Image (spheres, coloured by chain):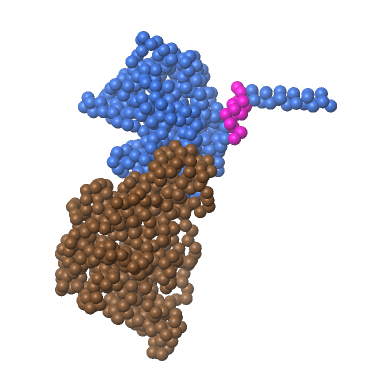
Chain colours: A blue, B brown
Amino acid sequence: MRRRALFILLAALLLAIVALAHNNGAGWRWLVQGGWHTSARMGALTPEEQRWAQVAWRYFDNNTQPETGLINGSDKRPVTSVWQIGDTLIALTAARELKLIEEAEFERRLTRIIGTLNRLPLSGAGLPNRLYNTRNNTMVDYSNQPKSIGWSSQDIARLMMALRIVAVRHPAWSEYLERVVLRWNFCRIVDDKGQLYAGLLQNGQLITHQEGRLGDSEYSAAGFGLWGFPNQMSLRPPAQHVIVYGMALDIDARDPRTTWTPSAITTMPYALSGLEYGWELPGAGRETGKLLRQRASLVYQAQEQRWLREKILTARSDFNLSAAPWHVNDTLYANGYPWNTLGDDGNYYPRLAQVSTRAVFGLWALWDTDFTDALMRMTRLQYDEQRGWYEGRTEATGDYNRAITLSTNATVLEALLYKANMGPLLPDGQLTDNSYFSQRLSDLFNRPQQCFPVERKPTERPDVP
Amino acid sequence: MKQAIHFPSLTVYRRLCVLARLLRLPVLTRLPLLHVLVRLSKLPVLALLLLPGLAGAVSLPAADYPVRHGDLTPREMAMAKNAWQYFVANTQPKTGLVNAVNKYPSTTMWDSASYLAALTAARELKIIDKAEFDRRLLQFMGTLNKLVLFRNEMPNKAYNTITAQKVDYMNKPGEIGFSAIDIGRMLMWLKIIKERYPEYGNSIDNVVLGWDFTHVVDDCGTLYGAYVDPNKQTHYVQEGRLGYEEYAAAGFQQWGFSTCQGSRPEPYALADIYCVLVPYDSRDPRLTNQHNYVVTESYLLHGLEMGWDKGDDREDSPRNYSHPWMKDFADRVYQAQENRYMITGTLTARSEHQLDKAPYFVYDTVFSDGFNWNTITDKGKYVPETAAISLKAAMGMWALWDSPYTDRLLDTIENADEEGKGYYEGLYENGDGPIKEFTANNNGIMLEALLFKKEGKLLKFNTDNPRKPEFAPSLWERRLVDLFEPNNDRRNRPFLEVTPPVKTWCDQTGTAVRSAPSCKACKCASCKNEDAPVKLPPVATSCLKQ
């Protein structure tokens, strides 16, 4: 009797091990990454989802510039932001993992991009310019004229994060990926307390100002935290409550009327923090982590409530437009008003509010609910098979916003990768002492003097893990 | 020497925070806000953990502050006399009207109602005798009856106080429209005077009978103002936002109008202001050209005049607030201001007020147009440097909430007056001293707040109760129940309830009774359920700050 029971137990154990190890240990990842208690969608892609990924990859196929390996930021327009170079690396990683491309093609594409990044002409103070021409890898301004206009810490943080995503999945490449960052000078972009700064070149003068309001701020902080930079100030921006459907949502407490910088709550920073880090941002302790998770959950719930109560499908994020005002920040709350839709010119454009494709994919991957099913039902065919996914669907009319951009198509791939990966893409992305980066900086007598973490004064961390 | 005062409301904050701890919200001892509270109270942090009684923790301290009641002290009497100086200096002998702003001969219905409030208070507080009161009121009522109306409908927005002519914004003869909010306040005070001094009932009723209510209130009880566009076309647009809308509606209600939609708090949303959830009107100011300001004045006028009671509540019990939500909303607006003082140290009593320099008038708010503590011009420009302690708001808060904070407010404003001119409009929050402007509204509301301390709710119904058998209908009532009075329908006068004594009177005089159609919903479909209980929103958040 006892022997038989033992046999059954052993057989069950063996079966469990096989099940967990099957498909590259997918079952094991499911178990350890919390698949059994998460709200997210996890599992292999269905044939339809695989088709979605193909449509998104179509954009990258169409828009690759052979000379540089860079991808146009929007369809056929040969300009990319540094944020979008980050998007490109994530999309490429996803394409390989979702088996949209062969290893050889991955290698060719990655080689070209890394080469370009390591030759990137730098803007004032030794940092990547906001925009580059994708054909010839030169710094350009918003009208695609050759010009150095300064940097955005937000964009650079995204690229720093994307470099880590590639490195973690393809460790053999990490040396070349780390060289990209070692070229930059961090003295003006982040201070010892972890406040991030944007740089603006005007008439040859470099002006820096604090960058990042609550939401964006923590997400940017994470990118710098991965590389060991101080980021505490940016992880905990001043917050206050606004009440939406009886829920207290956190918004930046700095006054947009006097600082001329909008305070906004929108989906993407929270969705990306979820997809990449599972809201456990590098540098954040337990308290901050809990807070971030709670904020993300409220951002989801407020949009769900709008659908439940007012019957309006809602998935908000900033988006591009093929006409003025060109770029719109479509929010849950901004500058004093719920469901505010702000153009980059600061005006209010309620007619432009839309269900954003990338917000839908972010919410859909992270929350497996009736609401995200409803969102996806109206989003799943929102593409041009030959060109990629549209930006979104306009709330007021039901029309497509037919702009097609790199960021939206990259987010589609990122969300699908999250599902197939069964969890966050970068749960342990911080650099180890074993890396080329650390070795290069450990030489006390030959430091690059570019304000890398080891060159800074150690700072206090109020919220240690 | 003032001693440190104890703020009872601190206790409740501590309880709120303990409650939050029990709900496993982030660690509280780290919160700067809490540090402020603890420092203020000079209590060890440990005391936080020992506080008993979480039940009822989520109600505002303001809800438990009593109203002030009792005879005026010599100091308060002196304040009343100081405020009355404004009216001595600014009454126009030819018309009996009072300038709304010192020496500027123009006024509105709102400011004239504030004069009626001042006049009542002056008489009741024995600053003037009955003879002086009668001389002033007889002349005033005569002028009011003779005013030329806007398009023969309602009083124009502004009148010249020397000539009693209707004027435009530049005080030049002309007409610019009417304000339902201003008229609502005037109706309220005409009713208060009619009830207190029935000897004036006749001339008061004649004023109101002369008005045409066709456009000012619709079948659902929504209030409309009128304005004239540059092409001289008249437009009637919904007027009033949460607070003022309901206060004005209460004035119309006193004359028998059903104001179902105007009296509802909806649509509103909540703002978290120093842990208090303050309701504001959620109609979008970007689309409607009306700011959704939350200020003290509208709520305190309802408190002083109606005692936060329903319009038909003839009881005079000060501790019983029969209006389903007005008292609660007023408490929130008060509490947000007290909390601001506790947390930032800025004495706060906000209202709209005049300035002694450009832009001359601001909405100095608790919340408006999306922002807490917004101070904006009528065009919506942000002018934080003009924020001030409004004296009328401070005085009204003092009368309605007996608390250490309002004691301090009174100490602050007590001597902010000028001999022979009355009280200043306000004291700049940034320390720039007084706003050296004097207004009828500011001094009038200060006087009515002092009268409230002595007498309680200012609307004192006389014994002539329409439900009692010996009831004698007034001129207004007699006309309105007469089916053959042609102006009743023409001027959109309300239907009065035909109580048995009214019915008897009609029978005795052979008057055919005009009564409301039995089907209420036929008049306004959305007002079927007027007496449905109001569900109050939660009052506070867990005062957690980063």
Q: Which residues are magenta?
A: A23-37
Residue A219: horizontal and vertical position, in percent?
42, 31
When the figure is inspected, residue A164 is found, relative to residue B420, above or below; the finding is above
Query: Residue drawn 50% across and 32% down?
Result: A286
| In this rendering, position of residue B383 left or right of residue A212 | left
When the figure is inspected, residue B436 is found, relative to residue B31, above or below; the finding is below
Residue B429: horizontal and vertical position, in percent?
27, 49
The quadrant where residue B294 appears = bottom left
The quadrant where residue B163 appears = bottom left
Query: Residue drawn 29% across and 59% down?
Result: B392
In the picture, the quarter occupied by the C terminus of chain B is top left
Query: Residue drawn 22% across and 76% down?
Result: B132
When the figure is inspected, residue B522 is found, relative to residue A396, above or below; the finding is below
Q: Residue B414 versus residue B151: which sits nearer the camera?
A: B414
| In this rendering, position of residue B353 left or right of residue A156 | left
Q: Residue B40 versus residue A105: which sits nearer the camera?
A: B40
Residue A63: horizontal and vertical position, in percent?
40, 26
| In this rendering, position of residue B435 left or right of residue B197 | left
Figure disc tally: 0
